[in-house]
Image (tube, helix red, strand yellow):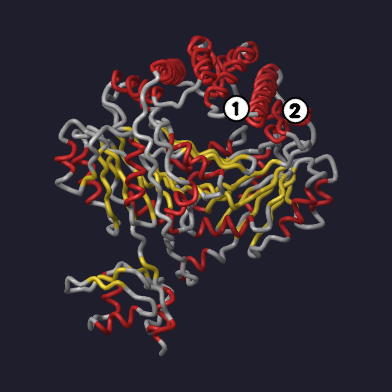
Amino acid sequence: MNTNSHKPFAGQPIFIPGSHHIHVAQVGETLEYIAEIYKQDLAELIAVNGLHLPSAVQDNTFVQLLPHIQPISLVSIIIPLYNESRHVSELCQAIQNQTYSHIEVLLIDAGSTDNTIEIAANYFPVMCCNQRIQSYTARNLGIRNARGSYLIFTDGDCIPRSDWVERLVRKLDQGYDTVAGDTHAVLWSQSVMCRAFLEEAPRAWLEYAGGQVTAWFPTCNVAYRRTVFERLGLFQEHNTGSDVLFSKKAGEAGFSCAIEPMAVVDHYYAQGYNEILQKWLRYGEKRQMNGRRLAFAIAQISLFPFHLVDSIIKRSFSQDIINNFIENVLIKSCIKTVHQLFDTIGSARGCLKRKKHYSQTQLLVSNESYSTPKTSSVLPTSKEYLLKAKASIIVPLYNEGRHVRSLCEALQIQTYQNIQVILVDNGSTDNTVSIASEYFDVFKCPNPGSYHARNVGLASASGEYILFTDGDCVPHPLWVEQMVTSLSDGYDVVAGSTLGIDFHNNTICQELVRGSLAKMAFKGTKATCYFPTCNVSYRRTVFEKLGYFRNYSGSDTRFSQEAFKAGFRCIIDPKSIVYHHIADSYWELCQRWFRAANHRNLKWYGIISAILRIGFLPVSLIISAVNELFEADVVNKQILQEIMARLIRKLFVDIFFSSGAIYARIKPPRRVF
């Protein structure tokens, strides 16, 4: 056997059981060679160094064993500290109790004036600064000194759960570049007011629309591959929200993003109303302001009463059932508006005071190249079975004669072959059925409503996985394969990326046909999982536990929310792509929004809010324009076009969606689309 032909451990430290030696593998050395030198059992050497062996590897001879060995990645946990004496002890104990042990902890003190350093030093080494520095400066210092291939961030007032690192690493090992976990704000009171205030605490959200990814990942709970920083640089050190700006930049640069809701940290965001208001003011003061943004900040403050009314109208319209109007609408709308007000006041005050920034020293990441773990080509037997399981594709059809042929041809060329296609006609009056019958069998649904049709498909489905799309969609050839791959990784619900097909090549049309976007968001004490059925897949067990869809508008997204609350694992996979013919003209698009609102079973307050929404629209558009221009760091022609397109979309949606809801109340529709 030629041991020199295998070199997977060159430059890696190898820990020797029963001694104090650490052997750094040289080029040309193999693990068997190192075991022979130190007279160690090969299996024990593998176990001590935390090396994974896929369960499918049955023969333990060195020739077959070595190519499948994967070293566990070193993880660097970076935590900035500033006057965290109340929480740092609990934080350090939580880090020590992590189930993933191959970690290094970098605590960077940002100039604490209490006994934070003394407490933290009892657990881990602390990097101290002689002066007060920004939290992002501290994080950048940690990045520069980190040795791990994965960098995980949290804050000094956060307490991670014991499996926090393990879950984030597992997600990164699947090929994602940045992963955010869920953050639970710790209540200082059980009152309704406290819960409403903490809904404004930062939590991750992620959405895909029109092929664009928007990742909003705060550093209280996020993980990155080192390669992301090597390519994009470090955090901006003197701008509040640099963490979420960096995650958004990573998504736009093509790095894959994901949310792992089971990777949880508990966050002591604030311990009183006065503290939380002061925090919002401080966040605003750290904004990088200029004369233009100052003008819009002043405009925002003057529009505060109108913004409050606008928030109440929107919230009351979106609530189909309001158990407590004061709690669910008035209190939450007021607190959300107060949050924006204090943030804006802080921004204006910080600009007027011309506050001095801290040191402008740029900390550069080393140019040293870092290797990331390679995934084994051998999969466990259980996963091999899951990757071959049948996938049932359910598609409701109603008057889709223009698009059904493209749909069927796309389903025929799927790379994943073990599929069952279930087309369910919902009473079409055109040539939809005759065209679809040329490709697949077509089921009939006697009851009107696309969700009735989907339920008919569910009753006929025999697959382990249930995939949904619509009659006006065209799945990518790899769509089923990507969905099955994600489901076989242990997820129960997977949503893909839906790309709207624009009928005019301009910014306004592209904004209007963004498509039904999939979104995961965590905010305050609530989590949102918004997965439309134009591009989503479920394990069969989800329906066995929760039942079928209800027949009303938005039943698909509410079902995904129920699945998430029931403990099923959900994820967005941007590689599962579906192209969507949302409309072929502006008028058809407006009609679609009008019909969509016909499904809403609004109560009296919903109808009143719909009427107010239309009447208040001019002021609402002004508020939206001011907010957009205030948030934009740079305003150029392209940014102005995008803002204008979003305002036009808001105009159309508010008018036609609200009008459709009012019309449905006056004259209920005869059928549901």
Instruction: List x then y, in percent, for residue 33.
Output: 32, 83
Residue 623: horizontal and vertical position, in percent? 57, 16
Percent position (x, y) of residue 84? 22, 34
Q: Is residue 412 left or right of residue 619?
A: right
Tag 2 secondary structure: helix
Amino acid marked by disc 2: Gln
| Lateral position of residue 358 relative to residue 296, left or right | left
Q: Residue at x 30, y 68 (%)?
A: 13
Where residue 353 sits, quadrant-wise, is top left
User: In the image, 544: left or right of 506?
Assistant: left
> In the rendered picture of this protein, how many numbered marks are placed on residues?
2
| Callout 1 secondary element | loop
The location of residue 214, given as percent across then percent down, is 54, 39
Q: Label 1 neighbourhood size at 10 Å, few (<14), some (14-19), many (20+)?
A: few
Q: Is residue 350 above or below residue 673?
A: above
Relative to 637, 604 lies left or right: left
Residue identifier under label 1: 635
Residue 531, can we see it? no
- The disc placed on residue 591 is 2
Q: Residue at x 52, y 20 (%)?
A: 293
The kind of residue on which mark 1 rests is: Val
Q: Is residue 505 above or below residue 484?
A: above
| Position of the C terminus by quadrant | top right
- What is the distance, in whole Å, between disc 2 and disc 1 at their CAs? 33 Å
Q: Nearer the viewer, mark 2 or mark 1?
A: 1
Which quadrant is home to the N terminus? bottom left
Of 24 and 473, nearer the camera is 24
For this orientation, the residue located farthest to the bottom is: 1
Q: Residue at x 24, y 39 (%)?
A: 129
Q: Is residue 512 visible?
A: yes
